Image: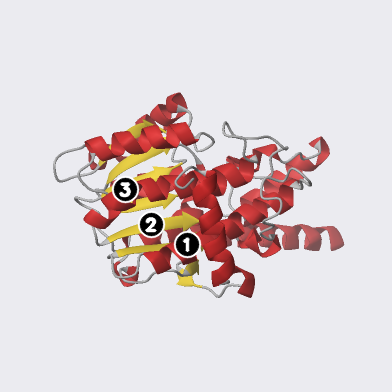
Amino acid sequence: MAVAAALGAGLGAALALLAWRYLRGAAAAAVGAGDGDMRGKTVIITGANSGLGRATAAELLRRRARVIMGCRDRARAESAARDIRAELGPCAAGSAHDGDLLVRELDLASLRSVRRFCHRVLQEEPRLDVLINNAGIFQCPYMKTEDGFEMQFGVNHLGHFLLTNLLLGLLKSSAPSRVVVVSSKLYKYGEINFDDLNSEMNYNKSFCYSRSKLANILFTKELARRLEGTGVTVNALHPGICRTNLGRHVNVPLLAKPLLSFVSWAFFKTPLEGAQTSIYLASSPDVESVSGKYFGNCKEEELLPKAMDDLVARKLWDISEVMVGLLK
């Protein structure tokens, strides 16, 4: 009796979990099927060959946007683009009025690559309606970018800082337009240490990731202030915990991997579920005039005071301008 009861309880729990996962996926699909037609609009997404970026690219292409995938690995990006086109079928057929999917090389760990990417965009694209700063690196061992910056701060903040600034003119001339910045709830554990932004005195991979995500939000707040009255909005978001390859640098003991795989399947968001807030901020008319805010699950959320410090945001902006070579 006891064994049968235990088996029955286990089966019931498994069925409940399956139903919950199905309903959550259906809810995400319903959001993705909502408003926000992107016909005639051009969108740039960084890191669009996998994870959240790929899911965002596919959904915006389905909504008929012209999507430019800015990716470090061109071969992987081309492969992802072929898969997306195959999945969407007729929706991916480019024309003057329908969606199109383009791959452009962009390595955010190289300021030279960022400048080269922007130069090509400014030469080839008459307009830019949405820029989605999505790419990121998570808790990697200490390493430096091509320009000598700590990798997480260099890619997650400085690379996107330069990219956005170089494309601001095109965004302004295309207004109303939008900038979407993918941050993380882990910003809560970060601090901006102006005496060691490059982490040369002390490096903690978790802390440095959180600091780069806090920098994303401070950048968003300051950029929103500078863009007032231009018709360009900028908002930040956290996608939640998702099943992507972002955690590839995290070492998991071999014996713990099966358990982690189950927990990931059961409780983590799929890339499409995690991408919903990016899609919402890029396309929904509900946020057309909203700027300088922070979102999760397609709703505005409150920030800790350290992410709303105007003085720190302005100082970080000024220092970032020097670091990327916009000012000398």
Disc 1 or 2, which lies upstream in sequence? 2
Camera sees residue 183: no
Residue 43's mark?
A: 3
Q: How far apart are marks 1 and 2 (CA)?
A: 9 Å
Q: Where is residue 254 in the image (x, y as percent from the top left)?
A: 80, 35
Camera sees residue 290: yes
In front: mark 3 or mark 1? Answer: 1
Residue at 74 percent across and 42 percent down: it is 200
Disc 3 or 2, which lies upstream in sequence? 3
Whether tag 3 and tag 2 are in contact, CB under 8 A, the answer is no
Q: Position of residue 33 (x, y in %)?
A: 33, 59
241 is higher (above) or lower (below) than 61: below
107, 42: nearer the viewer: 107
Residue 179's mark?
A: 2
Residue at far front of view: 328
Whether tag 1 and tag 2 are in contact, CB under 8 A, the answer is yes
Residue at 81 percent across and 38 percent down: it is 253
Q: What residue type is labelled 1?
A: Thr
Q: How far apart are marks 3 and 1 (CA)?
A: 18 Å
37, 258: nearer the viewer: 37
127, 202: nearer the viewer: 202
Q: What residue type is labelled 2?
A: Val
Residue 220's mark?
A: 1
